[in-house]
Image (spheres, rainbow, N blue to C red):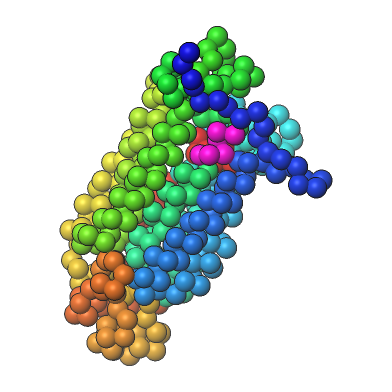
Amino acid sequence: MMAFIPSPSVNGFHLGPAYVHFYGLMYVVGIVAAIAITQRRWKAQGGDPALVGDVALWAVPAGIVGGRIYFDITTPKYIPHHWYGVLAVWDGGLGIWGGITLGALVGIWRVRRAGANVPLFMDAVAPALLVAQAAGRIGNYFNQELFGGPTRLPWGLEIAPAFRPAGYTQYSTFHPTFLYELIFDLLLAAFLVWLGHHRDIKPPGLFALYVTGYSAFRIFEESLRVDPSEHFLGLRLNTYVASVLTIVGIVWFVRTQRRSRAAVPPTAVLADEAEAGDSAAVGDAGTLGDAGPAGDAGPAEDAVAVEPGATSEGEPAVGDDSARQH
């Protein structure tokens, strides 16, 4: 008899009077892991780890709001039928691209206020975001959601009748697409870390590759999923979003790598030194140049001093599933 992946019988546990959902718990785990990873990477590039905590304090709530807005717009069939349904993250979900977009915009604002290098920070956070997304997908498993079409493959996921979408009630095992994404997210995160240490990738090249790789995988994933979604010309809305972002990511990466190395600013500059135009002193005192591995800062002559809050040439306007990802 073929063995399949069983679905959990519960989606949380009681902690005193409160009921803790595994879905929400995994998001907390993902956020904590992302902060720790980013702090380590940012410190290795000469940045202040305290900045990561400040950015997270603002960007995480913004990401939740952006993710919920995107979810409500693109998967209205999943909105709970309560007056507070559009806000019920614990009984609904988050859209990854909405969360990344608003969270990134707010994060950029905080990094600029600190006078730090936005592209370098984006490269530091890229692998961490993928790890957080992978943790969130474990929550989807406990919610018996975001699975693909029917399959009899050995790794098919057993779904209880109550969670099977209309038209698929006669099937019992489905593609565990959230598991496919979890594995891909971790592999892509490892690849970005390796690439940053072994190749001269100009920032924010790693973040551009994150957008490209994740979006390209979502095209494949959306072709398998059967959960309710808005459709246009026979395709899921997320398929179009993923296709556009894949192209945007490729173009963004190519442009960042063609940019002159001299356009890459230091990680942070003291205001008085920047105003005095003492670029040589700044370059000698901690300019990072390229976002390479720890202890492998770019040559001082490649760095230029900028006023706090300035951004590098070609800096992108960052755009991009969840307490239910989709």
- Whether 77 is drawn above or below 214: the answer is above
* Residue 65: x %, y % from top left: 58, 49
Q: Residue at x 62, y 16 (%)?
A: 161
**Main SS class of the magenta portion in the image:** helix
* Residue 169: x %, y % from top left: 57, 12
Tell whether position 256 is magenta.
no
Q: Is residue 118 left or right of residue 291?
A: right
Q: Hey, which residue is sitting farthest top in the picture?
A: 170
* Residue 192: x %, y % from top left: 31, 53
Q: Nearer the viewer, residue 184 or 116?
A: 184
Q: Residue at x 34, y 63 (%)?
A: 119
Q: Is residue 289 left or right of residue 323?
A: left
Residue 143 can be seen, yes or no? yes
Count of numbered circles in the view: 0
Q: Which residues are magenta?
A: 137-142
- The answer to which quarter of the image holds residue 175 is top left
* Residue 45: x %, y % from top left: 34, 71
Residue 231 can be seen, yes or no? no
Q: Hey, which residue is sitting farthest right in the picture?
A: 17
Q: Nearer the viewer, residue 233 or 258?
A: 258
- Whether 26 is drawn above or below 238: the answer is below
Q: Residue at x 62, y 44 (%)?
A: 24
Q: Is residue 266 left or right of residue 34?
A: left
- The answer to which quarter of the image holds residue 43 is bottom left
Q: Residue at x 31, y 70 (%)?
A: 294
Q: Nearer the viewer, residue 164 or 307?
A: 164
